[in-house]
């Protein structure tokens, strides 16, 4: 009987919820599109995704093919962005570089989000010992500056693409867990959560149906903002020689490789860096717009 | 107040203990045998066993951890296999001041640029001054410091020849020379910070200017500079100080990159080189020092913040 009653209430609630979330979503979209910077950011973001997805079709040359006859060529009709010290086509390498950034950024932040949100929900909802243990781990993770944490993980795991993804994922778990836990704590005291608990809805169902949908928007905002930081960190690690290994066409690696030729061939560092700046500016504008649209109360913050 | 500081201190010590375990375990996981690396070409089974014993690597992992912590607390951090110097000297005497000077330079630079631009943008809200200023702020906020460093070296160092691009001289020994060498690195590290502070200053001043007490002051005839500096700025500074404090730790990230690009012998460069040389005990000590610095900065910012903002004190 209790189950049936709970079921009915849930359906009505769901229906109301759907109607509400529809109008909310519209309002968010309107707020988002009213912000010119955010729209430009979204445009750059979509372009970045498309370039990453279609890299094999867009790149005019093989990004790994060396041609010593063609080394150090300045930008021309044949090589729009010139060639590097191995005679590799820079345009093709930059296009593939976006793909690496995209893969690392998306996979690491997605892993961090899934684990961090689960930790935050569990800590905030159950409290007690679970919270104490989980949040001490989070404090530990957050008490390192992200780059240093990523560096130690790279040391422990060894260099390479998969390890970069793993190291960055661990680095970002703390942020997601902390945000989710704070919001979960606030929601736990809300009447609709208590009502559901009194009706005998199981803990997991309460978390899934009543808490999770309400903590979603700050999580999405975190995703947008941290994506930019992850891409920045990945290129930084590779720049230091602690990330992806050559000859992978990685933006950070290309900037590092071009450093020695900055006087003679500034385009080798220049274009990958410019590409990185455009992507990060776009993601930041997009993330800021997302925050203002989803969470209008929040102020500008780090 | 004192009780709060005491509580935080206990919390911090527990945190440091957890971090020490974490760092130790991760370094144990690292590939490569440090004994082999140290011996190099002197390798033979006896020397291997002797050195292993000397380093305490034949004991249990728990004992190794305890010995390491004991030695770390006493300041005995071992020596570098490559330079032969004591790790404590390399870290605290040689590298730490460089990083501190660099951070201080960037902070000064960022505040000098960012606060006036933020105020100007807020006062000229929605004009081209505002858009240009905030556009630049977002731009610098997004510029990876290692790339900005390279661009600055190319433009101001190589092409124009205005500033030196490499090397470090201690400002304590030769002030002008030291500062001269720190200008480009400070700009590189400070640009990101300046972008952030300018945006906070602007949004916070815009909010404050809409407050009732400002309207009252205006109605009383207070105008121009007096309004902004005497009445508004006090409240603008609270969020600014918060962010400046919160992000001081974030500066360490940029410092690693900046030191590598400009070949400044600071902590960031030390840890990078140590990783590449697989000197794990050096990495271990450096990471602990960075973590301690990071925690101390955050701790003092928290305590200072409670002191500055009486409203938080009651909570």
Image (cartoon, coloured by chain):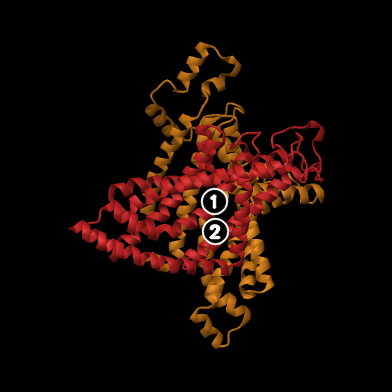
Chain colours: A red, B orange
Q: CA distance from mark 2 to mark 1?
A: 9 Å
**Which residue is nearer to you in this view: A70 or A296?**
A70
Q: Residues within 10 Å of mark 1 (few under 14, many from 20)?
A: many
> Quick check: B116 above or below B183?
below
Q: Position of residue B223 (x, y in %)?
A: 61, 83
Q: Quick check: can you spot residue B148?
A: no
Image x and y of residue A271, in percent: 72, 47
Sequence-wise, the earlier of marks 2 and 1 is 1
Residue contact between numbered discs 2 and 1, judged by CB atoms under 8 Å = yes
Q: Quadrant of residue A248?
A: top right
> Residue A178 versus residue B233: which sits nearer the camera?
A178
- Name the quadrant of the C terminus of chain B: bottom left
Q: Secondary structure at mark 2?
A: helix
Q: Which residue is mark 2?
A: A287
Relative image position of residue B219 (x, y in whole percent): 54, 88
Q: Chain of mark 1?
A: A
| Kind of element beneath mark 1 | helix
Q: Which residue is mark 1?
A: A227
**Residue A181: x and y, percent?**
37, 54
* Vertical placement of residue A60 versus A185, above or below: above
Viewer-proximal residue among B100 and A181? A181
Question: Of B21 and B305, which appears nearest the observer?
Answer: B21
Chain under numbered label 2: A
Residue A65 is marked as: none
Mark 2 and mark 1, same subunit? yes
Task: State the quadrant of the N terminus of chain B.
Answer: bottom left
């Amino acid at each position: 009987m209790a189950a049936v009653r709970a079921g009915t209430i849930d359906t009505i609630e769901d229906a109301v919820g759907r109607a509400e979330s529809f109008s909310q979503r519209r309002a968010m979209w309107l707020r988002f599109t009213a912000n010119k910077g955010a729209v430009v950011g979204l445009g750059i973001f979509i372009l970045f995704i498309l370039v990453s997805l279609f890299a094999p079709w867009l790149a005019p040359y093989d990004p790994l093919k060396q041609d010593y006859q063609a080394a150090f060529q300045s930008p021309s009709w044949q090589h729009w962005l010139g060639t590097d010290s191995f005679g590799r086509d820079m345009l093709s390498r930059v296009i593939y570089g976006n793909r690496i950034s995209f893969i690392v950024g998306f996979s690491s932040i997605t892993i961090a989000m899934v684990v961090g949100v689960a930790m935050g929900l569990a800590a905030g909802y159950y409290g007690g010992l679970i919270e104490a243990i989980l949040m001490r781990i989070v404090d530990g993770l957050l008490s390192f500056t992200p780059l240093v944490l990523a560096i130690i993980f790279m040391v422990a795991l060894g260099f390479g693409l998969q390890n970069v993804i793993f190291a960055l994922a661990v680095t970002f778990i703390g942020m997601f867990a902390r945000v989710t836990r704070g919001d979960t704590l606030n929601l736990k005291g809300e009447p609709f959560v208590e009502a559901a608990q009194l009706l005998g809805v199981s803990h997991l169902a309460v978390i899934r149906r009543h808490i999770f949908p309400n903590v979603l928007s700050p999580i999405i905002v975190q995703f947008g903002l941290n994506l930019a930081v992850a891409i920045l960190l990945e290129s930084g690690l590779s720049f230091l020689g602690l990330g992806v290994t050559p000859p992978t066409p990685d933006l950070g690696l290309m900037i590092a490789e071009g450093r020695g030729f900055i006087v003679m061939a500034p385009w080798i560092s220049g274009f990958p860096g410019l590409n990185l700046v455009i992507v990060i500016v776009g993601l930041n504008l997009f993330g800021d717009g997302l925050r203002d649209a989803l969470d209008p109360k929040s102020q500008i913050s780090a | 107040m004192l009780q709060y500081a005491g509580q935080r201190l206990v919390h911090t010590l527990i945190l440091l203990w957890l971090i020490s375990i974490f760092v130790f375990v991760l370094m144990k996981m690292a590939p490569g045998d440090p004994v082999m690396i140290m011996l190099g070409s002197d390798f033979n089974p006896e020397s291997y066993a002797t050195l292993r014993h000397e380093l305490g690597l034949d004991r249990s992992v728990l004992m190794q951890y305890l010995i390491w912590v004991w030695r770390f607390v006493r300041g005995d951090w071992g020596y570098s296999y490559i330079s032969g110097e004591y790790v404590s000297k390399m870290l605290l005497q040689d590298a730490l001041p460089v990083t501190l000077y660099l951070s201080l330079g960037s902070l000064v630079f960022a505040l000098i640029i960012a606060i006036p631009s933020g105020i100007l943008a807020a006062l000229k809200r929605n004009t081209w001054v505002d858009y240009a200023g905030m556009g630049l702020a977002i731009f610098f906020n997004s510029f990876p410091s290692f790339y900005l460093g390279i661009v600055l070296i190319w433009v101001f160092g190589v092409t124009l020849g205005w500033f030196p691009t490499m090397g470090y001289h201690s400002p304590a020994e030769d002030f002008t020379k030291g500062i001269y060498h720190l200008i480009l690195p400070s700009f590189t590290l400070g640009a990101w910070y300046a972008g952030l502070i300018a945006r906070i200053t602007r949004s916070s001043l815009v909010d404050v200017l809409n407050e009732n007490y400002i309207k009252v002051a205006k109605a009383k005839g207070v105008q121009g500079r007096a309004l902004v500096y005497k009445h508004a700025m006090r409240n603008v500074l609270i969020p600014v100080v918060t962010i400046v404090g919160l992000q001081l730790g974030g500066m360490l990230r940029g410092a690693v990159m900046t030191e590598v690009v400009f070949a400044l012998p600071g902590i960031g460069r030390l840890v990078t080189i140590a990783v590449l040389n697989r000197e794990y005990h050096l990495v271990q000590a450096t990471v602990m020092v960075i973590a301690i610095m990071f925690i101390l900065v955050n701790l003092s910012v928290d305590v200072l913040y409670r002191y500055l903002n009486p409203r938080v004190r009651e909570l």
